[in-house]
Image (cartoon, rainbow, N blue to C red):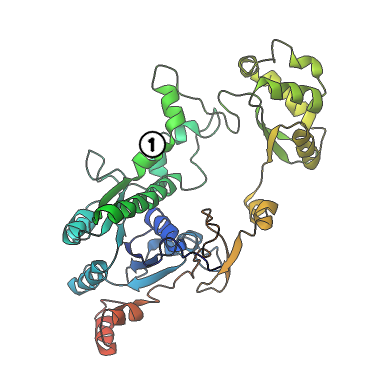
Amino acid sequence: MSLQPLPLDGITVVAVEQAVSAPFATRQLADLGARVIKVERPDGGDFARGYDTAAKGLASHFVWCNRGKESLAVDLKDPRGRELVGRLVADADVFVQNLAQGAAARLGLDAATLCAAHPRLVGVDISGYGSGGPYAHKAAYDMLVQCEAGLVSVTGTSEQPVKAGIPAADVAAAMYAFSGVLAALVRRGTTGLGGPVEISMLESLAEWMGHPLHHGMHGSPAPVRTGLAHAVIAPYDAYRTADGGRVLLSVQNDREWRRLAEQVAGRPELADDPDFATNTARTANRERTDEVVGAALAELSTAEAVARLEAARIACARLNSVGDLAGHPQLAARDRWREIGSPAGPLRALLPPITLPGGAPARMGAVPALGEHTDALLKGLGLSEAEVAALRGRGVVA
């Protein structure tokens, strides 16, 4: 039986992108079969290429967000460079950009301008705060938007707010851009028209703040920072084990508390104790509740604690490191790792989390070198070797 094609086979995406939000969005499209042409500056390219050298000399952010793309190095400030990109856009299905607010419009590369010229095009503008309002031109790096969106106010300990350890605002915007493109392509399939899509990092992360937002804006106080604990559920925290590990557990209802008291803590009398029998009581007596659970797990190794909690049907998890994730047995058992090509040689990479049984495997292409595909792309537009060489000599392309 032949495999079904990838959902985005035949779709071409042109992306004037940098950092994380747009590149991560377009990488999802590439994984699902789209051809993604990444437009970069000749003098260094996407600045995320220089963030670090952790991935065998390559930047970890760039490797994560840019596999499977073709790199075109072209100077968009030069009219000849813009004309080349315009020719690519004319034959594309999707255009994505996340330049600084107003920069794309000055170049004629904003979604509204391009979609007016090409009605079937899906054009995506990603920005920090949106195209209007008092914050429209405010600098918008991930950590700044985490602060503006209130994420930092609910992350950390009671003494210290902290940002998320991943670029949450960038990732939120990327995933709404990805889903927005898919929705717009479905609409185009029925109407024949593409159209602009606008995504802002603030609005994306504000949506992800739904629980604390609704908890705090209808008259109740906003949730307090509780570290690994849960603001309204107890016990729900990470507890140290005898071998120096930490195990996080969550008791979601009073039946589970009874099992934990009887089968894990060895304190069956606490199942009906009014100070512990209900979640409201346990939350009010959080310190005492944590003492009971902590004392029980402190006598067990991490493996013993997990085994006992699982036997009692209590949800639990090891507090893993990044290294533990890289060697996670569940990812290995489900064959989620692949090798991708890169200028530094083969690199490990995870399959995308969208699994389509019966379809072709995800297209996990190589991470491109800066300008690796410039010549091929320009020759595809009909330019001769001499014309490409002349543009390169003038610094229009690299």
Q: Nearer the viewer, residue 308 or 122?
A: 122
For the image shown, how many numbered marks are present on the structure? 1
Q: Is residue 179 left or right of residue 197?
A: right
Q: Is residue 352 left or right of residue 246?
A: left
Q: Residue 49 in the image: x percent, y percent?
A: 43, 64
- Residue pictured at 65% horizontal, 48% vertical: 321
- Residue pictured at 53% horizontal, 53% vertical: 353
Q: Is residue 350 left or right of residue 107?
A: right
Which quadrant does the C terminus fall into? bottom left
Tell me: residue 328, above or below residue 85. Answer: above
- The image quadrant of residue 193 is bottom left
Return the residue at label 1: 206
Outermost residue, front direction?
1
Does the image show residue 241? no
Q: How busy is the neighbourhood of tag 1: few (under 14 within 10 Å), some, or many (20 plus)?
A: some
Which quadrant does the N terminus fall into? bottom right
Q: Residue type at mark 1: give it.
A: Ala
Outermost residue, bottom direction?
386
Q: Residue 367 in the image: x percent, y percent?
A: 47, 69
Q: Residue 119 in the image: x percent, y percent?
A: 20, 58
Q: Nearer the viewer, residue 258 or 370?
A: 258
Tell me: residue 159, above or below residue 202. Answer: above
Outermost residue, top direction?
274
Does the image show residue 122? yes
Q: Secondary structure at mark 1?
A: helix
- Residue pictured at 43% horizontal, 37% vertical: 208
- Residue pictured at 27% horizontal, 84% vertical: 388
Tell me: residue 264, above or below residue 144. Answer: above
Q: Nearer the viewer, residue 58 or 24?
A: 24
Q: Nearer the viewer, residue 216 or 144?
A: 216
